[in-house]
Image (tube, helix red, strand yellow):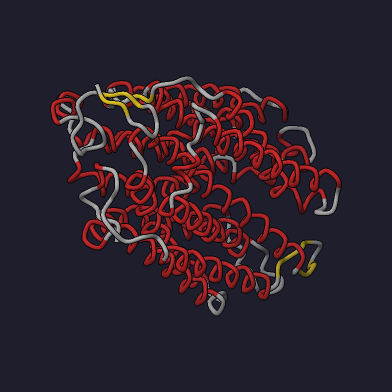
Amino acid sequence: MTKSPSSGSTHGPADDDGGLSARDRRRLTRVHSDRTIIATLAGTGLIAAFMQTLVTPIIPELPQLLDSVPSDTSWVLTSTLLAAAISTPISGRLGDMYGKRCIVLVLLTFMAVGSVVAALSDSVIPMIVGRSLQGIGLGVIALGISILRDVIHPKNLGGAVALVSATLGIGGAIGLPVAAVIAENFSWHYLFWLATLLSLVAIAAVAWVVPVSTLRTAGRFDFVGALGLGVGLIGILLGVSKGTEWGWASPGILGLLIGGVVVLVGWGFYELRSDHALIDLRVAARRPVLLTNLASISVGFAFFITSASLPILLQGATTTGVAFGLPLLLASLCLMPLGLVMFFTSPLAARLSGAKGPRTSLILGTAILAVTYGAAIFLTTEIWHVVLISLFVGLGVGTAYAAMPTLIMSAVPPSENAASNGLNSVMRTLGSTVAATVVGVILSTQAVVADGESIPTTGAFQLSFGIGAVVALVGMLIAFFIPRGNARFGNTASIPVQ
């Protein structure tokens, strides 16, 4: 038996393929092919991502449907975001310790239970509980990427990681029209019964197809670290997401933001001194990991610009001549190219990473985003402009998302794989949360009132796209400073970091 000095992980005889020997790898994959495992994990990621856009078609009607007020029903969205951000790094560590497949099944069970609770809800509190449980399940995407490192042959790893990483965008973009059709033609409860069915299908598929990895991290779970991370993230993410609604200078928002930062600083000092840290901050501080996570914030921000602005541009009233007044279904179809392009981009991005290194893919992806949003400043007058923006944003995000997990896995030991990917997912979420807040402030403050409806001005959309271009450019510059060189840890050796 060998023991990793940096993490205390224990596993069997290892080769250079993620800590598993060739014999173990053959044993793990003898029943199902790499292709079947990849398809199962990608499908699970699509289902998890669908949960994010599930309630989008019914957001305006939620106060009436749940007999509540908008300030309360907004928690239907916020609770999912917070639950996902907290559960992802924690479930990653649990996966490293107790088996990633086992934790994936646990998360999918939470998702299924949450879907049932939401489906049976007629008031706001049970709905928030159900949506929170669904949010816990979103950690399956990061865990799925980590599973690939353990069980997939290195020659197939790059494309597999790219595909599963892209499911976050693909599932949301493709799931929105499906949710719109159900919401417009059936009871809204059917949205959650569909989510229940999909969750059960995912549980069955993972249990049947995905093999159990023998790789484990020794030690005990860091409950204090998990609590500290959760409290700190809640403070910051809740403060950012509710700042406009509650007032940025209000005691509540200031307390959340300052308190969240203080807690995370204290959490960091505690983790550095812990023998069984939830997240090894020394690993997270390594230059490739740190810079990749910073770039991930940028990509998450740029990605969410489309989700926060383009639906309003497509669906807003035509009174002022700015928006296009499309129904929800048509607007969703206009945004579908984003997800489809991400799907078809993932294998191409994987080939680029294999040939030139994931660093190159990240630089290219952020460059595409910067150019796209720069052009979007001048392309807001036709529906095909919006479709074109959506298409190229999908191209940029798909290319960048394909690179980030590979960069992370090439710089961390196998025992830190799932936890480090979970932290990277939190960075993307942080970027998306900030983007939603920034765009929300811009579109609400730079608006005109026509026929009793507040409609954002052309300048509001242009400013949003301009900020997206700048943030993407910053991400590209950060990516340039990611070190060149071969992967430090074995299973990504076939994908050099250049």
Q: Nearer the viewer, residue 120 or 425?
A: 425
Residue 351, picture quadrant? bottom left
Residue 447: quadrant of the picture: bottom right
Picture residue at 50% right of the left edge, 77% below the top: 375
| Residue 171 image position (x, y, % from top left) | 43, 45
Where does the image place residue 357, in percent across and percent down from the top left? 28, 59
Q: Residue furthest bottom?
A: 378
Q: Residue at x 59, y 26 (%)?
A: 119
Q: Quadrant of the C terminus?
A: bottom left
Q: Is residue 425 visible?
A: yes
Where residue 32 sits: x, y (%)? 19, 28
Q: Which of the pair 27/67 is nearer the observer?
A: 27
Residue depicted at x 24% and y 21%: 1
Query: Relative to residue 166, is residue 276 depicted above or below?
Result: above
Eyeballing the image, is 104 above or below 350?
A: above
Q: How many marks?
A: 0
Q: Relative to 425, say whether 127 is above or below.
A: above
Q: Is residue 27 left or right of residue 250?
A: left
> Can you see residue 201?
no
50 or 494, which lies in front? 494
In the image, what residue occupies the spot 53% across and 48% down? Answer: 427
Please provide percent x and percent y for residue 237: 66, 44
